[in-house]
């Protein structure tokens, strides 16, 4: 009996390298915790076809918006750990939801990080009907009309939501937060004038700024964006101590064999280093990263702690 058990265990262990070597043998699904058209969706749809070309297997992007990314997060956590269900995680789905709401997954325990794909500044854009040309003028209007200006986000706990709450906290103003089920519908209502402003990713917001449909006032990072160098940072615009950036990374369910995780890491990092991909993402305001699974895991832990402090200090609630 003992010999039989040992034989089975050794046989199972021996199949892992073979699984990784043959992987993938069928289509892969990449869950995106947002509606089509946003930054995370754009990044997933940039990487997916290159993986398909490399492996000869279809890589399908599956948009599962809602609950600030928690729907896609739970689906990923509960999926079979075989490398055929992945998620292009966001700061909300992977780092902030645990401090905002009760989730049915733990981002440390239930995910296998693959790589941090990109980081990105956000940009503060307002509808042209708001009579502000600078951040200082916007703050003055908000102080004169507390609670009357609104800001849209892709959902509670998303980068845009936290950026807006940090703005409220540091500028001492009252803005009405209106969460949506993704970046695209949030931008639609800001462009239509239904909402006053939003903190949009450069990938999503820049086209509306360049067309004149929205007015851009600043970017949220510590330094100006290479893609839009004419825009000041929020700190330069007068909001002392302001710094916020969003990020996106590929994850698998916990328990996915290390060999498969490493194979995915190798291929995705190589894609991010391809000159046309790197140039395209950089020009759109995203900074490609492509680090190790261990480095991405450390980044997630750090971000959970950082934003937990901000959420508590600002008294941000999930609803």
Image (tube, rainbow, N blue to C red):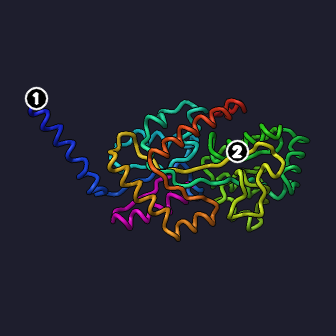
Q: Is residue 194 above or below residue 156?
A: below
Nearest the eye: 75 or 270: 270
Q: Residue at x 26, y 57 (%)?
A: 22
Q: Which mark is residue 2?
A: 1
Give the Cα separation between the discs numbered 1 and 2.
59 Å
Nearest the eye: 199 or 149: 199
**Viewer-side label of 1, 2:** 1
Tell me residue 42's x, y (percent). 55, 60
Secondary structure category for the residue under label 2: helix
Give the magenta range. Answer: 40-63
The stretch drawn in magenta includes residue 48: yes
Mark count: 2
Mark 1 or 2, nearer chain start: 1
Residue identified by numbered label 2: 163
Q: Residue at x 43, y 65 (%)?
A: 50
Nearest the eye: 184 or 6: 6
Label 2: few (<14), some (14–19) or many (≥20) C-alpha neighbours in 10 Å:
many
Tell me residue 126's x, y (percent). 78, 54
């Amino acid at each position: 009996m003992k010999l039989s058990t040992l034989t089975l265990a050794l046989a199972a262990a021996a199949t892992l390298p073979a699984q990784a070597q043959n992987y993938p043998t069928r289509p892969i699904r990449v869950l995106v915790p947002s509606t089509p058209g946003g930054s995370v969706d754009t990044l997933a749809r940039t990487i997916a076809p290159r993986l398909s070309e490399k492996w000869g297997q279809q890589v399908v992007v599956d948009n599962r918006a809602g609950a600030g990314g928690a729907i896609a997060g739970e689906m990923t956590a509960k999926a079979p750990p075989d490398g055929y269900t992945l998620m292009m995680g966001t700061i909300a789905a992977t780092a902030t939801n645990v401090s905002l709401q009760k989730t049915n997954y733990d981002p440390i325990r239930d995910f296998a990080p693959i790589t941090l794909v990109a980081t990105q500044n956000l940009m503060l854009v307002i509808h042209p009907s708001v009579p502000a040309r600078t951040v200082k003028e916007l703050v003055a209007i908000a102080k004169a009309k507390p609670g009357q200006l609104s800001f849209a986000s892709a959902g509670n706990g998303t980068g845009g939501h936290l950026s807006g709450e940090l703005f409220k906290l540091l500028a001492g103003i009252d803005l009405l937060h209106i969460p949506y089920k993704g970046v695209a519908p949030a931008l639609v209502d800001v462009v239509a004038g239904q909402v006053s402003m939003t903190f949009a990713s450069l990938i999503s917001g820049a086209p509306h700024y360049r067309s004149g449909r929205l007015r851009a006032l600043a970017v949220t990072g510590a330094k100006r964006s290479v893609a839009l160098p004419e825009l000041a940072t929020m700190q330069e615009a007068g909001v002392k101590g302001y710094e916020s950036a969003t990020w996106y990374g590929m994850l698998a369910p916990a328990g996915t064999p290390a060999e498969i995780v490493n194979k995915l890491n190798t291929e995705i990092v190589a894609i991010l280093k391809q000159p046309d991909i790197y140039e395209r993402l950089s020009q759109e305001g995203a900074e490609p990263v492509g680090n190790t699974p261990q480095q991405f895991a450390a980044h997630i832990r750090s971000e959970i702690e950082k934003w937990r402090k901000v959420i508590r200090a600002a008294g941000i609630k999930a609803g």
